[in-house]
Image (spheres, helix red, strand yellow):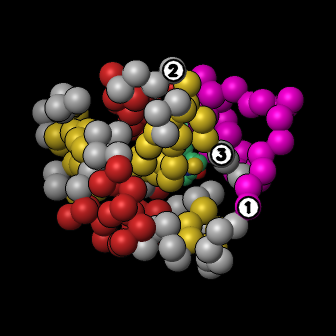
Amino acid sequence: MEKILKENRQGERMMQIRKMTMADYENIYALWMSCTGVGLNNLDDSKEGIEKFLNRNPDTCFVAEEDGRIIGVLLAGNDGRRGYIYHTAVHPDCRNKGIGTKLVNTVMQALKDLGINKTALVVFKRNESGNAFWEKMGFTERHDISYRNRIINEMIRYDL
Ligand SMILES: CC(C)(COP(=O)(O)OP(=O)(O)OC[C@H]1O[C@@H](n2cnc3c(N)ncnc32)[C@H](O)[C@@H]1OP(=O)(O)O)[C@@H](O)C(=O)NCCC(=O)NCCS
């Protein structure tokens, strides 16, 4: 999906949602580090880890950019059946202006274009604002299932 969304706020600032590239890595990592509620680790979120993810999912990872500054990011991928969203973040100075909503709408359309029928994500229970945001975005909580996983390679987690 090559569509680029541009907005002119009060005739001054131009915000666009565009696909992420590896040239954005340092800026998006700094953005994640400025947030609470995001869970990073030393393997998947290293430059090599993100590059691997981006190579597999080149059409479903997006950034929000304003005047050349990365102010939002959302990674999504799919396994041919479900879409999965990771690491959604908007810079603390730029929240509650609809940027998160635009990122979500853009990725949901991109996943739909790829033929994906349902998208999932995980949020820390303690992240009340994150859970409120996802509820607003229409991502309902499942009370009938338990999330389980098993480690293949040991990783160091940074739960922000
Ligand atoms: C969650 C986050 C991405 C939302 O981004 P945003 O650009 O501020 O979101 P939007 O402005 O598009 O808000 C969309 C809706 O979510 C609601 N919402 C957003 N932040 C909220 C909060 N802290 N508490 C309650 N509701 C919230 C808004 O009220 C809005 O609904 P409305 O339009 O009816 O008012 C941003 O707050 C963030 O980066 N948080 C830190 C990282 C994080 O927790 N990520 C999500 C978990 S992975």
Total tally of numbered discs in the picture: 3
Residue at (40% x, 29% y) in the render: 111
Residue at (46% x, 25% y) in the render: 116
Q: Amino acid at mark 2?
A: Asn
Nearer the N terminus, badge 3 or badge 1?
Answer: 3
Q: Image quarter for residue 64? A: top left
User: Is 60 left, or right, of 132 in this rendering?
Assistant: left
Image disc number at residue 150:
1
Q: Which residues are magenta?
A: 125-150
Nearer the N terminus, badge 3 or badge 2?
Answer: 2
135 within the magenta span: yes
Mark toward the viewer: 3 or 2: 2
Mark toward the viewer: 1 or 2: 1
Image disc number at residue 117:
2
Image quadrant, ligand 1: top right
Calculate the distance from the C-alpha at mark 1 to the C-alpha at mark 2. Answer: 26 Å
Residue at (27% x, 51% y) in the render: 20
Q: Which residue is mark 3?
A: 122
Check the picture and name the quadrant holding the C terminus.
bottom right
Is 115 above or below relative to 103? above
Q: Is mark 3 within 8 Å of ligand 1?
A: yes
Residue 132: horizontal and vertical position, in percent? 66, 35
Q: Image quarter for residue 137? A: top right
User: Is 132 left, or right, of 33 in this rendering?
Assistant: right
Nearer the N terminus, badge 1 or badge 2?
Answer: 2
Q: Nearer the viewer, residue 48 or 132?
A: 48
Image disc number at residue 160:
none
Residue 10 seen in render: no
Is 30 above or below relative to 113? below
Q: Amino acid at mark 1?
A: Arg
